[in-house]
């Protein structure tokens, strides 16, 4: 009998044992037998290090802490032994409820048309419809904003620059000019003495008035949210110093130019109850507190069978990425922000068999940052160097970046491109700078390497164009300068330039591909696209029951 008790004690001890997460420097193997691993703070995989995680392993992190990957992370689970990243606390986060007014629990607020759910234009759900809130004299102050943000479950708020309502369709708007909310007295915006109850409602009431635009941050009760920070893949620093102190990657940071570093891989991975960062870092680096973040990387990890649930912010966030993104067979649901948010310098985002549902923001938020590569960014990757369109020999390497400057008034320059068989070539325009409004440029595209081939486009323009594509693996591009008065000295200016690049792909190079996916029941739009450059391809995908729009294309070329 005593022997039986000893066996039970030993089994119980082994069952409840945990392992402190080791220093992740060098080649590290985390095994299922020593699982679960507990981390009490940020864990960093430095440049040059590789961490391999066995299938069936669990890693637990304390409140707000992150796993920061600058080296290589290989987390390859299996169908029946998934790798789990989760919070070390038993207090689980599921939702951040709004505070409802006692007299009418159906009145609530949200922010739309922002980069995340914490900033944007204010809408109020009133009489069974979401309506923009506008003001005539714009006497909204920070305490009015803070109280409104608390109605949405956030902590503090401020009024940020607004836009004039001159382009929206005719919706019934709500006019709230001066809430005059009182600290420690008013518990709801509609209780404030300056608010007329009910607010003024009308079809044209917001004509020639201004929208209320707010910025919120934090949580109304941050201590009740005990999520961990999430996984962050960021740029690699050119230093031999190994430090446990997280660094912030920005445009002034020295980065290590090694595009041949081994690619990180996540397969059959669950990321649960993440997305929380210390309140003081949220506003300045909002993109760094998703459950899964890829931040400013030259090479993106490979993701397959990823499940992200119950994030306190976005489920997945790809921020300022400079290469294509592939996400397959994955789920992002029940997150406080967007399901998947992408801010790309490159485009070509593919979501294949991805299920995105019940998120508090958009299901998919995509924004194209179509700006030129800086000198530092060109030095990091030689493929980003801008070559002279008029002086460079025909290119066979893709992507190929060019700067076109007309050598003289009324002249043309030509480039011919050839790619692999069964591929197509797409021309993207990054920027068009003209010193004189009378200046024009003309682009001619031919479906082959010679101008005797079929003409695809002949466009005269003075602004950034939509992307243009071939129907074969060969393309000829001709750029010509023109002007209303070619003899005028102001017609031709050496500061004029066009930045463009050519890429190859199986089809037309799209901004976003969404295949075989479901985007349903999200609180804002199913798919929202800002600054569309080429096209969005949706194939065999269900987008329905989202509370704002199914597909919302905000702007573009």
Image (cartoon, rainbow, N blue to C red):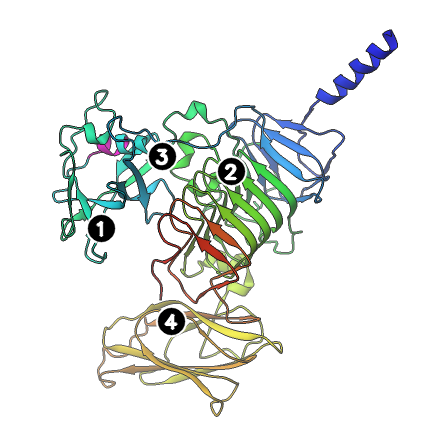
Q: Which of pointers 1 and 2 lies earlier in the amino acid sequence?
A: 1
Q: Quadrant of residue 77?
A: top right
Q: Which of pointers 3 and 4 lies earlier in the amino acid sequence?
A: 3
Q: Which of pointers 4 and 2 lies earlier in the amino acid sequence?
A: 2
User: Would you say residue 12 is visible in this rendering?
Assistant: yes
Q: Which residue is mark 3?
A: 217
Asked whether the residues under the numbered discs 3 and 2 touch, taking CB atoms below 8 Å apart as contact, a structural biologist would say: no
Asked whether the residues under the numbered discs 4 and 2 touch, taking CB atoms below 8 Å apart as contact, a structural biologist would say: no
Q: Which residue is mark 4?
A: 498
State how far apart marks 1 and 2 are (Cα).
35 Å
Q: Is residue 163 left or right of residue 446?
A: left
Q: Which residue is mark 1?
A: 163
Q: Which residue is mark 2?
A: 247
Which contiguous range is marked in magenta?
141-146
Local secondary structure at mark 2: loop
Q: Is residue 177 left or right of residue 213?
A: left
State how far apart marks 3 and 4 are (Cα).
39 Å
> Residue, x 39% and y 51% (percent of image)?
525
- Of residues 178 and 5, the one nearer the viewer is 5
């Amino acid at each position: 009998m005593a022997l039986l008790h000893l066996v039970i004690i030993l089994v119980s001890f082994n069952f409840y044992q945990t392992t402190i997460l080791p220093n992740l420097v060098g080649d590290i193997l985390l095994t299922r037998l020593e699982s679960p691993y507990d981390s009490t703070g940020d864990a960093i995989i430095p440049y040059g290090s590789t961490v391999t995680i066995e299938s069936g392993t669990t890693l637990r992190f304390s409140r707000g802490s992150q796993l920061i990957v600058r080296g290589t992370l290989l987390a390859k689970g299996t169908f029946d032994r998934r790798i789990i990243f989760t919070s070390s606390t038993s207090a689980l986060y599921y939702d951040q409820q709004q505070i409802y007014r006692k007299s009418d629990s159906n009145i609530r607020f949200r922010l739309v048309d922002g980069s995340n759910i914490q900033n944007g234009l204010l809408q109020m759900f009133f009489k069974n419809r979401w309506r923009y809130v506008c003001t005539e004299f714009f006497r909204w102050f920070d305490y009015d904003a803070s109280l409104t943000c608390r109605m949405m479950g956030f902590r503090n708020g401020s009024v940020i620059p607004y836009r004039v309502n001159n382009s929206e369709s005719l919706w019934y708007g709500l006019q709230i000019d001066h809430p005059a909310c009182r600290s420690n007295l008013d518990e709801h915006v509609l209780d404030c003495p300056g608010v007329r109850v009910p607010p003024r409602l009308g079809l044209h009431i917001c004509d020639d008035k201004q929208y209320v635009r707010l910025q919120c941050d934090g949580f109304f009760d941050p201590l009740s949210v005990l999520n961990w920070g999430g996984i962050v893949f960021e740029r690699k620093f050119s230093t031999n110093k190994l430090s446990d102190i997280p660094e912030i990657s920005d445009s002034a940071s020295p980065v290590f130019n090694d595009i041949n570093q081994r690619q990180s891989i996540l397969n059959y991975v669950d990321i649960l109850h993440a997305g929380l960062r210390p309140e003081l870092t949220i506003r300045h680096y909002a993109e760094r507190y998703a459950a899964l973040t890829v931040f400013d990387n030259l090479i993106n990890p490979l993701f397959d069978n990823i499940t992200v649930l119950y994030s306190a912010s976005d489920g997945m966030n790809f921020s300022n990425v400079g290469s294509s993104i592939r996400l397959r067979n994955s789920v992002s649901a029940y997150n406080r922000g967007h399901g998947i948010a992408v801010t790309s310098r490159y485009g070509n985002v593919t979501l294949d068999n991805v299920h995105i549902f019940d998120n508090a923001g958009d299901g998919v938020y995509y924004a194209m940052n179509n700006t030129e590569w800086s000198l530092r960014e060109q030095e990091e990757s030689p493929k980003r160097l801008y070559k002279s369109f008029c002086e460079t020999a025909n290119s066979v390497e893709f992507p190929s970046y060019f700067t076109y400057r007309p050598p003289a008034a009324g002249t043309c320059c030509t480039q011919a491109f050839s790619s692999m068989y069964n591929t197509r070539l797409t021309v993207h325009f990054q920027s068009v700078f003209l010193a004189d409004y009378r200046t024009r440029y003309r682009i001619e595209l031919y479906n082959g390497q010679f101008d005797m081939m079929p003409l695809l486009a002949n466009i005269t323009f003075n602004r950034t164009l939509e992307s243009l594509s071939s129907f074969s693996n060969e393309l000829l591009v001709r750029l010509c300068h023109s002007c209303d008065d070619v003899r005028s000295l102001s017609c031709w200016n050496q500061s004029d330039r066009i930045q463009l690049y050519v890429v190859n792909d199986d089809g037309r190079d799209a901004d976003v591909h969404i295949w075989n996916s479901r985007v349903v029941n999200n609180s804002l739009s199913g798919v929202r696209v800002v600054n569309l450059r080429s096209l969005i391809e949706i194939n065999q995908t269900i987008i329905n029951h989202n509370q704002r729009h199914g597909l919302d294309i905000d702007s573009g070329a």
